[in-house]
Amino acid sequence: MRAAKAAMVALAVAFAVIQLIPVARSNPPEAGDPAAPVAIVRILKRACYDCHSNQTQWPWYSFVAPVSWLVSRHVTEARQRLNFSEWEAYTSDPETASHKLAGIADQVSGEKMAPWYYRAVHPQARLSHAERQQLIRWARATSAALRSSD
Amino acid sequence: MPRKPTVVNAFVLALGTSTALSLAVPSFADDGAMPQLRFEHGNFAPAQLTVPANKPFKVKVTNGSDAAIEFESFELHRERVVPPGETITVHMPSLAPGNYQFFDDFHHEVPKGLIVSQ
C-alpha cells in the first residue's frame, strides 16, 4: 500500500516536472497562402490549416505534457512537408508547387488526410464526399496548369 | 641560404591557394554558370554547393542512378521527383547567407547535401 502511494506521488511529481520542459508552439508570420477559390480556402482552413499552416489553433491538450510534445512534433513535421502559409515559396519553382498539389490530391483521394486519429477528435477536419471531390479536382487542375506553365 | 619572400612569391601563393579552394568546393558566382548536382552510387555529388547570396538561381539535378529520387529541401521549400537517367532544373529563390540542407526523400539513408549561400 505504501509502495503504491509512493509510486503515485512520484508520478504526480514527474507529471508536474515535465510541464516545465519548453515546447515549441509558435505561429510564425504568414508568407502567402494559395490563391484558390473561396470554397477551397474554406475547406483547407477548416480541415488542414491546424497542422499545415502557421495559423494553428493550439488545443488545450497541446499545453499538457507529454501530449504537448507529440502535438508540437506533429505540427512541425506537417509544416515541413506542406505549409500553406508559405505557399508563395513553393510557387517560385512551379514544378514544386505542382508536385505539392498532386500530393494533396493523392492524400485526399486515398483518405490519408486528415489522418483518422486527428479526425476522431476534430470533427471539423472530416470532409464530406462532395468536399473531398471538390478539393481533388482543384488540386489536380491547378497542378496540371502549373506543370504546363513551367 | 633561404630566399626572402618576394611580392611575386606571395602573389603566386595567394593565387594557388584560391584556385585550390575554388576547386575543392564548387562555387557559382556571377558568371552565369548553372550549379549542377548529380545523384549516383547513393550520393549527391558534390555534397556541397556554394552559391551567391541574395540572388535567385537555378540548379540542375541529374539522376544517374537506376531508381527515381526525390530531391527535397524543407528549408528551401523544394520537392521534385527525378526519374532515373533524367535531369531537372530547380528554380531557387534568393537566399540569405547561410546553409540549406537537401536530401533524397525516397532514400533516407542517402547522406544529406548542403547548399551554402554566401
Image: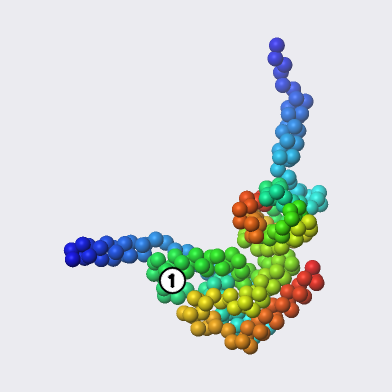
Residue A67 placement, left or right of B11 = left
Please say if B118 is above or below A100.
above
**Viewer-proximal residue among A98 and A29:** A98
For badge 1, the amino acid type reads Ser
**What x and y, as percent, mark residue B36?**
76, 51
Please say if B96 is above or below A135.
above
**Viewer-proximal residue among B59 and A55:** B59
User: What is the quadrant of residue B21 in the picture?
Assistant: top right
**What x and y, as percent, mark residue B105?**
64, 60
User: What is the quadrant of residue B85 in the picture?
Assistant: bottom right
Residue on which disc 1 sits: A62
Which residue is pictured at 74% across the width and 39% down the height? B23
Residue lying farthest to the front in this orientation: B66
**What x and y, as percent, mark residue B110?**
63, 52
Dot 1: element: helix
Can residue B92 be seen?
Answer: no
Residue B73 placement, left or right of A47 = right
Write down the chain letter for disc 1.
A
**What x and y, as percent, mark residue A67?**
42, 69
Which residue is pictured at 67% across the width and 84% down the height? A134
Please say if B30 is above or below A150.
above
Residue lying farthest to the top in this orientation: B1
Which residue is pictured at 75% across the width and 36% down the height? B19
Can residue B30 be seen?
Answer: yes
Label 1 neighbourhood size at 10 Å, few (<14), some (14-19), many (20+)?
A: some
User: What is the quadrant of residue A132 in the picture?
Assistant: bottom right
Looking at the rendering, in which quadrant would you find the N terminus of chain B? top right
Q: How is the image coloured?
A: rainbow
